[in-house]
Amino acid sequence: MSFPHIVRRGARIRARSTGRRTRWYLGVAVLLLLSSGALFLFLAMKARQPADSGTRAPTSTPDNLPAAQLSEFIPPFQADTFEGKRFAIADYEDKTAVIIDFWASWCSFCEEEIPLLQQMAEVYGKEALTMVGIHRGDTESAERGIALAAKLGITYTLLQDPEGKLFMLLSQGRPFMPLTIFVDREGRVVERRIGPKTAEEIRVSTAKIINDNAKSKSQNPK
């Protein structure tokens, strides 16, 4: 004696189970495809991201200020100014103290400190102090840097760093802004200041390399 209704019921159960498994597999496949697509788009956008929109050196805080390295000499670098002239740091060795400041228009701390550096340049004059601002052209267009320089009335030497090579050379691998380097007359790095600085900190650091220069001149008169 057969029971066709029981057989039909078993078939329906198997069909439902198979359908659920199929839908589950399809859901997993769709989820994997969506995840892979999202990852691909993210990597593609990151690879194509222009320097002006994202490759900025992070700003820092006073906690990141490193200790001075008195035995370090500034590398003999050269670069072009915004006016197209050639600048060589070696031309100022044994002549003046030097302050090297990296800046960009997106760095709010840099914008606050530039007028303070301009003031130091005016107080000491070119015979005692050479002020050099290096624009981070690898993080934004030169036009933005020129616009900020005009807005702030910068009169000291401004160098271009379109590929970030000078920043890599002088930052010692620390990708933080602002970065200001205080160099004495003999070319020694007296202080490398990373992070925002107060007017008093800039004044004291500048006076230090100026006083070191005066002491060196008195000990080694020409």
Image (cartoon, rainbow, N blue to C red):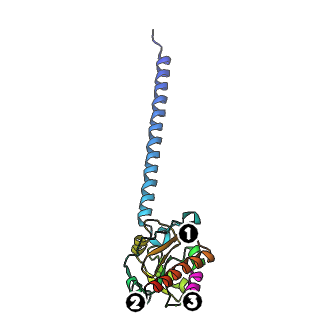
Disc 1/disc 3 C-alpha distance (Å): 23 Å
Instruction: Between label 2 and label 1, give the one nearer the viewer.
Output: 1
Kind of residue sitting beneath label 3: Glu
Residue name at image x 59 percent, y 79 percent: 203
Q: Which residues are magenta?
A: 114-120
Give residue 23's position: percent from left, percent from top: 47, 38
Disc 2/disc 1 C-alpha distance (Å): 29 Å
Q: Is residue 61 above or below residue 156?
A: above
Which circle marks residue 122 in the picture?
A: 3
Residue in front for this viewpoint, 57 or 6: 57
Q: Residues within 10 Å of mark 3 (few under 14, many from 20)?
A: some
Kind of residue sitting beneath label 2: Lys
Residue that label 2 marks: 85
Residue 64 occupies which quadrant of the picture? Answer: bottom right
* Majority SS type along the magenta span: helix
The quadrant of the image that shows the N terminus is top left
Kind of residue sitting beneath label 1: Gly
Disc 3/disc 2 C-alpha distance (Å): 22 Å
First-in-chain label (3 vs 2)? 2
Which circle marks residue 195 in the picture?
A: 1
Residue in front for this viewpoint, 102 or 121: 121
